[in-house]
Amino acid sequence: MRIRIVGIGMGAHQITPEAADALRTVDYVVAAEKQQGDPLLAIRREIAAELGVPLVAVPDPPRDREPDGDGGYAAAVAGWHAARTAAYEAVLAERQGTAAFLVWGDPAFYDSTIRIVEAIAERGVVEVDYDVVPGISALQLLAARHRIVLHDLGQPLHVTTGRLLADAVADGQANIAVMLNRSVELDGLDEWTIWWGGNLGRPEEELVAGRVGDVLPEIETARERIRAAAGWVLDIFVVRKPVVP
Ligand SMILES: C[S@@+](CC[C@H](N)C(=O)[O-])C[C@H]1O[C@@H](n2cnc3c(N)ncnc32)[C@H](O)[C@@H]1O
């Protein structure tokens, strides 16, 4: 059978023609249902319905959100991925044909669909061939909305998670993109510049930019407004160290 891993950007309006063409070739979409009324599942349903493809919702296995330390985090994620792999495999084995996974943003950034499909292929219970179609990532959208290049001329960009931001700063990274934030913690970075975006590409989208020490309260308020409007918040930001002349 065939699996198509398709990046969907931030929703139906960001599906590229290449992604739409790929989705027209599939028999069904497989999607995780994270909770009752999962908002990202609703967006996937909308996309599948527009393309006339049935969607099979797979209840997402529970995940330990408060593991101890880095080892605990890795073990919690590994256990969750194994359970997800088994759940998807059962659907694929039963339905066969060509399936699509609709990946939020782009499959290359902080998304495990490719790893899970690789694991399914390795297990060999279902024989699968798969490809990946790119989508517009939150990182690209952040840059576009703020009308910025993500790094200074010829300089690097370090991409990490909120959990690992302090380590990146301690390691001397000076231009850092941060995803997977449970909150925005920027202790000691008051003089840095931040470009922040919440629920980018959605109707409740908010942007804030400026000196961290000045705009942090504005970001907190924007996060609260988004949560009140949509019921969920996904945010991303770039922080850049000031250049000392
Ligand atoms: C599981 S990762 C998936 C990233 C996705 N594959 C991409 O390419 O954007 C989810 C994280 O991406 C960022 N993100 C995703 N959608 C976003 C949005 N609409 N606005 C702001 N950040 C978003 C947030 O940092 C969020 O915690």
Image (spheres, helix red, strand yellow):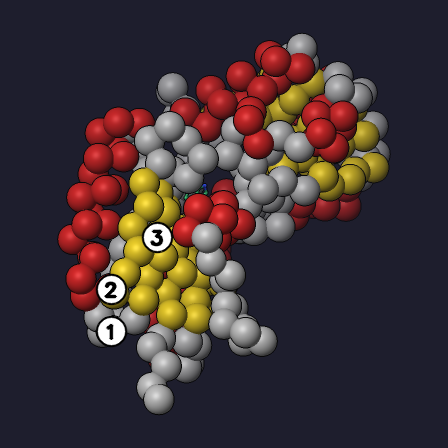
How crowded is the residue under tag 1: few (<14 C-alpha within 10 Å), some, or many (20+)? Answer: some
**Residue 65, percent from left and from top:** 35, 46
Amino acid type, label 3 = Trp
Q: Are marks 1 and 3 in contact (CB under 8 Å)?
A: no
**Residue 49, percent from left and from top:** 60, 12
Residue at 45% in and 35% down:
201
Instruction: Decide if residue 87 is on the left or right side of residue 66.
Output: right
Q: Which residue is mark 1?
A: 191
**Residue 221, percent from left and from top:** 18, 44
Q: Are marks 2 and 3 in contact (CB under 8 Å)?
A: no
How crowded is the residue under tag 2: few (<14 C-alpha within 10 Å), some, or many (20+)? Answer: many
- The answer to whether residue 239 of the structure is visible from this angle is yes
Instruction: Decide if residue 217 is on the left or right side of residue 116.
Output: left
- The answer to whether residue 77 of the structure is visible from this angle is no
Instruction: Decide if residue 170 is on the left or right side of residue 183.
Output: right
Secondary structure of residue under mark 2: helix
Q: Is residue 194 above or below residue 199?
A: below
Residue at 47% in and 20% down:
42
Q: Are marks 2 and 1 in contact (CB under 8 Å)?
A: yes
**Gap between marks 2 and 3 measured at Cα:** 10 Å
How crowded is the residue under tag 3: few (<14 C-alpha within 10 Å), some, or many (20+)? Answer: many
**Between 203 and 232, the one nearer to me in the picture:** 203
Q: Which residue is mark 3?
A: 196
Amino acid type, label 1 = Glu
Q: Which residue is mark 2?
A: 212
Q: Which of pointers 2 and 1 lies earlier in the amino acid sequence?
A: 1
**Residue 14, percent from left and from top:** 57, 32
**Gap between marks 1 and 3 measured at Cα:** 15 Å
**Between 100 and 203, the one nearer to me in the picture:** 203
